[in-house]
Image (cartoon, grey):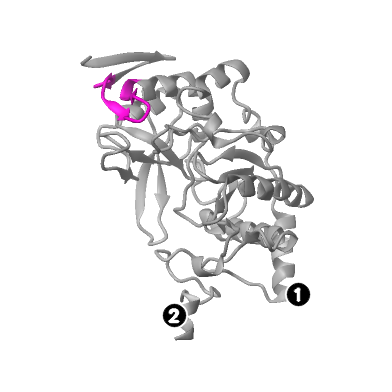
């Protein structure tokens, strides 16, 4: 077994230990394969992570071993990788690594990081998100095809509000749509905008789409997970490797690709070829920041005209003024 692999990217040479360790037994992919993958898509992976406080989802023994989320920057973080201080809902703080060059992605991959979970903020201003992220989550009885249908209608909703969405596969059964925004609104305001978008999407297709927080109320629909915009909630970044046996990756898509592409098209073996041929299809994302005035006005109208206020926060989040009771409906009835 090779002792180490040295990969050069830009001005950095990153040492990858135990490159022959098998990380994906089903496909035979090794730790070295993961590192070479991130080298091949480095510009795209960095574009999704640049200057963002990032949580590392680490699998030091591969996808069949134990894993953990590392929020605080590792103690052996090189001096050339900066950090950003983020505040959790509890009020506690942490300094997370903020990649600024492709070498940082490789360095994290050597720690067994498969999936990167960046915050929707930049280290220069960690209180004002610059992305509104929408997670289309298939519930039992639904599949990726239903998420695609929801995503195409979501595009129409966003455009009606002056917002530009950028779609990607989650790497699992769902879809993500990221909307770059000017960093002028707080986390609660961005979440309120996401709720307004989700409710409008639900109104357009109530038989297939839901904003119900409680699983017992969702049925066989696509859940628009508005709470992915709550503070300290993150979504796997574009190009992240996902911890499933067939080694899929979260793949950025053009809108015209959405109807026909399927998650199985994009994995550790196929994405490097796609990237070499067409590059990062989301390369221009950061240049098209949208504004939230129309979405916030929709939220205000929902509350004023229909009595639709806030929705429940995640269970670990401190109680927020005006938030509905966090009681499962079946338990509330009892």
Whether residue 27 appears in magenta in the rendering, the answer is yes
Query: Mark 2 against mark 1, which lies toward the viewer?
Result: 2
Residue 247 seen by the camera: yes
Q: Toward which corner of the image does residue 99 lie, by quadrant?
A: top left
Q: In this view of the protein, which residue sits in the foreground, 171 or 235?
A: 171
Dot 2 and dot 1 residues touching (CB under 8 Å): no
Q: Which residue is mark 1?
A: 305
**Quadrant where the image shows the C terminus:** bottom left
Q: Is residue 62 above or below residue 186?
A: above
Earlier sequence position, callout 2 versus callout 1: 1
Q: Which residue is mark 2?
A: 331
At numbered mark 1, what does the secondary structure look like: helix, strand or loop? helix
Whether residue 160 appears in magenta in the rendering, the answer is no
Q: Residue furthest front?
A: 141
At which x and y percent is residue 207?
68, 62
Q: Toward which corner of the image does residue 244 lie, by quadrant?
A: top left
At which x and y percent is residue 25?
32, 30
Q: CA distance from mark 2 to mark 1?
A: 29 Å
Residue found at x 32% / y 43%:
70
Q: Residues within 10 Å of mark 1 (few under 14, many from 20)?
A: few
Q: Is residue 334 above or below residue 1?
A: below
Q: Residues within 10 Å of mark 2 (few under 14, many from 20)?
A: few
At which x and y percent is residue 47?
54, 30
Q: Is residue 21 above or below residue 58?
A: above
Q: In this view of the protein, which residue sits in the foreground, 90 or 220?
A: 220
At numbered mark 2, what does the secondary structure look like: helix, strand or loop? helix
Write down the region rendered in magenta. 16-32
Q: Residue furthest bottom?
A: 334
Q: In this view of the protein, which residue sits in the foreground, 310 or 326?
A: 326
**Quadrant where the image shows the N terminus:** top left
């Amino acid at each position: 077994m090779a002792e180490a692999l040295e990969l050069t990217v830009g001005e950095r040479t990153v040492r990858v230990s135990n490159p022959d360790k098998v990380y994906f037994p089903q496909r035979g992919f090794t730790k070295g394969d993961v590192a070479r993958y991130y080298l091949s898509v480095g510009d795209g992976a960095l574009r999704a992570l640049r200057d963002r406080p990032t949580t590392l989802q680490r699998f030091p023994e591969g996808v069949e071993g134990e894993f953990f989320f590392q929020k605080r920057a590792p103690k052996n973080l090189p001096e050339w990788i900066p950090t950003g201080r983020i505040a959790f809902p509890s009020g506690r703080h942490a300094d997370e690594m903020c990649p600024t060059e492709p070498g940082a992605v490789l360095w994290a991959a050597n720690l067994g990081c498969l999936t990167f979970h960046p915050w929707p903020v930049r280290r220069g201003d960690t209180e004002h998100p610059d992305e509104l992220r929408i997670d289309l989550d298939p519930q039992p009885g639904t599949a990726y095809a239903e998420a695609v249908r929801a995503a195409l209608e979501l595009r129409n909703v966003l455009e009606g509000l002056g917002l530009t969405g950028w779609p990607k596969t989650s790497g699992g059964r769902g879809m993500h749509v990221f909307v770059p925004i000017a960093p002028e609104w707080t986390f609660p305001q961005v979440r309120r905008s996401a709720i307004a978008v989700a409710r409008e999407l639900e109104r357009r297709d109530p038989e297939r789409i839901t904003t119900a927080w409680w699983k017992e109320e969702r049925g066989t629909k696509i859940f628009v997970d508005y709470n992915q915009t709550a503070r300290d909630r993150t979504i796997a970044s574009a190009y992240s490797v996902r911890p499933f046996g067939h080694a899929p990756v979260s793949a950025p898509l053009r809108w015209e690709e959405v109807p026909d592409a399927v998650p199985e098209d994009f994995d550790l073996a196929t994405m490097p070829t796609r990237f070499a041929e067409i590059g990062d299809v989301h390369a221009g994302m950061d240049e098209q920041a949208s504004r939230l005035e129309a979405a916030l006005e929709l939220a205000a109208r929902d509350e004023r005209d229909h009595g639709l206020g806030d929705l429940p926060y995640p269970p670990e989040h401190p109680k927020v003024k005006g938030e509905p009771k966090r009681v499962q409906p079946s338990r509330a009835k009892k």
